[in-house]
Amino acid sequence: MLQSTRDSPGLEYIGRLVSRAEEWAWRNKDPVVEFLESSSGELVFIYNRLGYTAASILYWIITTLNPSKQPVIQDSDTIAYYRLVYREPSTIVYFTTTGNDPALIRLCDAARLTGSNVLLITPPPPEPVSSMLRDTRVLEIPYMKEEVLTALTESLLALYVGVEAYGLKGFRIDRLRENAREGFREILGELYSKYGEALNQLCRADTITITSTRFLEPAGYVFVEVFREVGKNASYIPVSLLKPRRGEKILLLANSVEEHLVREKKMKALLSGAQVIDIVMNTDPLESPIYLILLAIRLLH
């Protein structure tokens, strides 16, 4: 069972982790903003592993709030094999939560051959990989013991970059910018209190199926990784393909704008004998992945 969500040592520890992630992301946002604003050609956000969340946050902020920009988002190998070689030189921001994946080298080699400009955001790569990336612009995230903390740091960076780039104006972007500047540490107690029962139910599950719409799919994979880290069986399936089975425990991630979907899936699960644990975020959808990562981190600590 989770400890008390307001005063536990675990909460204090998570608070320190979040503060360090926020400080690093805020301090390093400007070079990424400058890279985006000076970019030419097609803008592409690429991801590997849990870097999917950061790439998705930045993609949705720019796509939603800056209609003049129409970026592309895709996993690393798909871009390397099927897109770069057939297009004009692109501007690429690549998020990865592991510095030793061969996909890094494949993508950077393809970009070099096609004249594309790459900014790689990654934990420190080992020396053999680092030497192969010598012609690539790299922003190194400090080493972190848990991959989900790297995902949080990258996602915060993506949020900060998204709300500061291109000089966007308007009520929604101003509110997102204000929230980003205030930080997330101060809301941890309230967040864990609100979703504490759902987290306790998840702690008791040995096997769990995570599902969501496409928008929250990246956060779904973060939960899969965390559940596996604590020794549970976990898998992800898009909600459009979900077929609840008797006895199955399902974690449904959603934004409040999707509440009709939550009611529908809960009813189907009830009729099939499955159990649905829902986490519905009542916040701007563009920042909801950050809150979900913070909930996933709570399961580890």
Image (tube, rainbow, N blue to C red):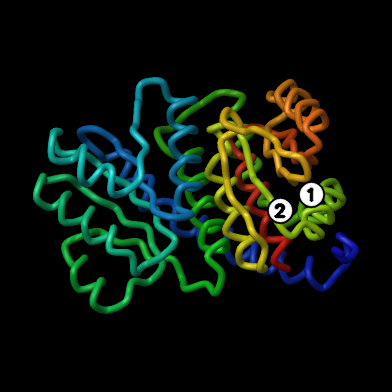
The residue depicted at 85 percent of the width and 52 percent of the height is 196
Query: What secondary structure is found at the residue carrying circle 2?
Result: helix
Image location (x, y in percent) of residue 221:
55, 50
User: Which numbered dot is residue 295?
Assistant: 2
Image location (x, y in percent) of residue 101:
33, 64
Relative side of 158 to 72, left or right: right
**For marks 2 and 1 on the same chain, the one whose residue lies earlier in the sequence:** 1
Relative side of 185 to 172, left or right: right
Rendering quarter of residue 186? bottom right
Where 70 sits versus 129, above or below? Answer: above
Q: Which quarter of the rendered picture does the C terminus lie within?
A: bottom right
Q: Which quarter of the rendered picture does the N terminus lie within?
A: bottom right
The amino acid type of the residue labelled 2 equals: Leu
The residue depicted at 25 percent of the width and 71 percent of the height is 129
Relative side of 182 to 150, left or right: right
Of 72 and 300, which appears nearest the observer? 300
The residue depicted at 28 percent of the width and 63 percent of the height is 102
Query: What secondary structure is found at the residue carrying circle 1?
Result: helix
Image location (x, y in percent) of residue 217:
55, 40
Of 67 and 240, which appears nearest the observer? 240
What residue is disc 1 on? 191
User: Which numbered dot is residue 231?
Assistant: none
Asked whether the beta carbons under mark 2 and mark 1 sit within 8 Å of each other, the answer is yes
Image location (x, y in percent) of residue 215:
55, 33
Where 287 sits versus 120, above or below? Answer: above
